[in-house]
Image (cartoon, rainbow, N blue to C red):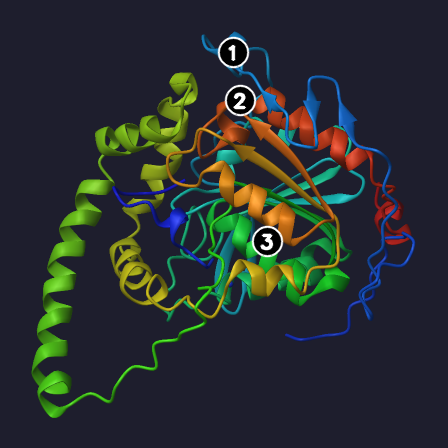
């Protein structure tokens, strides 16, 4: 999901208080030394949806894919807020049980999980968090590095959730979830990626070492380049936050466009009213987007130890099904469900996405911690 006319999810390798954290998921030990988050797998097979990669048809949903589903009420003021590193972070919390954390994509917010939160919260403790710089979270004027959201999600797990959880992420949120699970395995019991951002490393292994700036480059060319970038990206940001433009971009990545409605468009346009939104957009486009090469899918997958589910919209014009196949080949502990949808299958065909996710979650023997049960 994206604000604007670019498609960063196809290129983002992304994305991003250290303290003692005692995990409480109880599963048989994984092969990764030091990980206390363990699992027990059963054969995962869903009627009409097979993890080996059988495609799920959505033609019967063409008129209204979310008919009959409960929808998260839209609150212009937001739901819950948590202070992280001096910044206000917005999140939604519903249900009881094993925690499931939903992480949105570029330009989106917790409201993008509007059809998933009510359904999942019937069996799990569901959180949907707005990443710093997006949604109802603060538009912080900071240097956005690919690890900033990983740190945010990790601290959210420690301070708010307070036990290991299943992470679910779409697009940029998918790579954020992957990095968190790879770097902090004790916090994550399972991982679900929906058309995730990120790229595999260059097979040639060549890295651009760069060259030292000359005086001409440093004092003349670089300032001129920044002036041009600010002007160009300022116009692009103004254009991209127009409701008609957002609707057009959404319809280009939703194969079934019935859920591209006023609710969705408002959930994207309202955060752009923040006076810092334009500067955040500029920093993301010029700094974060150009400084990602060291964060690759294979690098993160090589550190992963928990079970992985790929819910993949095969008709995505930005992130095609070949990436999902490559991820599964690289990381065998993967279940793959192919969905006939675009870049955001969880919102385009939420019935099928919810069913696949719930069936996979039920195939893992997950138990909430005793501390969590005491608060039910």
Percent position of residue 325, x then y? 58, 42
Chain-order first, disc 2 or disc 3: 3
**Cβ–Cβ below 8 Å for labels 2 and 1?**
yes
In the displayed structure, would residue 81 be above or below residue 54? below
Percent position of residue 284, x then y? 33, 60
Residue nearer the viewer, 289 or 315: 315
Residue 61 numbered mark, or none: 1
Q: Residue furthest front?
A: 204
Tell me the SS state at disc 3: helix
Residue appearing at x 75%, y 34% in the figure: 360
**Residue 121 horizontal side relative to residue 33, left or right:** left
In the displayed structure, would residue 68 be above or below residue 247? above
**What whole-number distance in Å separates the C-alpha atoms at marks 3 and 1?**
29 Å
Report whether residue 349 is seen: yes
Residue nearer the viewer, 341 or 83: 341
Displayed quadrant of residue 242? top left
**Residue 37 horizontal side relative to residue 289, left or right:** right
In the displayed structure, would residue 140 be above or below residue 100? below
Chain-order first, disc 3 or disc 1: 1
Residue appearing at x 9%, y 78% in the figure: 221
Residue behind mark 2: 349
Q: Quadrant of the C terminus?
A: top right
Residue behind mark 3: 177
Displayed quadrant of residue 310? top right
Count of numbered labels shown in the rendering? 3
- Characterize the local packing of mark 2: few (<14), some (14-19) or many (20 or more) Cα atoms within 10 angstroms: many
Percent position of residue 323, x then y? 51, 45
């Amino acid at each position: 999901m994206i604000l604007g006319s670019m498609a960063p999810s196809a290129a983002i390798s992304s994305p991003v208080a250290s303290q003692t954290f005692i995990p409480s998921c109880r599963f048989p030990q994984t092969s990764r030394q030091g990980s206390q988050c363990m699992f027990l797998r059963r054969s995962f097979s869903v009627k009409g949806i097979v993890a080996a990669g059988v495609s799920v048809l959505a033609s019967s949903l063409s008129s209204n894919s979310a008919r009959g589903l409960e929808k998260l009420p839209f609150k212009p003021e937001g739901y819950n807020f948590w202070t992280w590193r001096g910044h206000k972070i917005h999140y939604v919390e519903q249900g009881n049980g094993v925690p499931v954390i939903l992480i949105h994509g570029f330009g989106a917010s917790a409201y993008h999980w509007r059809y998933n939160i009510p359904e999942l919260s019937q069996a799990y403790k569901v959180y949907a968090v707005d990443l710093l710089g997006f949604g109802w979270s603060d538009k912080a004027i900071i240097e956005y590095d690919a690890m900033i959201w990983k740190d945010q999600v990790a601290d959210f797990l420690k301070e708010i959730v307070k036990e290991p959880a299943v992470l679910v992420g779409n697009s940029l949120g998918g790579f954020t979830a992957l990095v968190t699970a790879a770097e902090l395995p004790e916090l994550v019991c399972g991982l679900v990626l929906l058309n995730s951002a990120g790229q595999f490393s260059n097979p040639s292994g060549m890295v651009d070492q760069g060259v030292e700036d000359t005086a001409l480059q440093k004092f003349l060319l670089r300032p001129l380049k920044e002036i041009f970038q600010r002007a160009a990206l300022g116009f692009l940001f103004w254009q991209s936050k127009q409701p008609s433009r957002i609707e057009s971009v959404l319809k280009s990545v939703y194969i079934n466009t019935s859920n591209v409605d006023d609710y969705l468009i408002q959930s994207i346009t309202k955060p752009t009213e923040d006076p810092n939104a334009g500067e955040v957009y500029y920093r993301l486009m010029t700094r974060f987007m150009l400084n990602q090469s060291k964060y690759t899918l294979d690098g993160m997958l090589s550190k992963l130890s928990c079970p992985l589910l790929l819910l993949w919209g095969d008709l995505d014009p930005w992130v095609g099904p070949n990436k999902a196949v490559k991820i599964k080949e690289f990381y065998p502990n993967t279940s793959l469900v192919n969905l006939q949808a675009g870049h955001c299958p969880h919102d385009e065909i939420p019935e099928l996405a919810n069913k696949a996710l719930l069936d996979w979650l039920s195939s893992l023997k997950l138990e909430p911690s005793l501390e969590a049960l005491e608060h039910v």
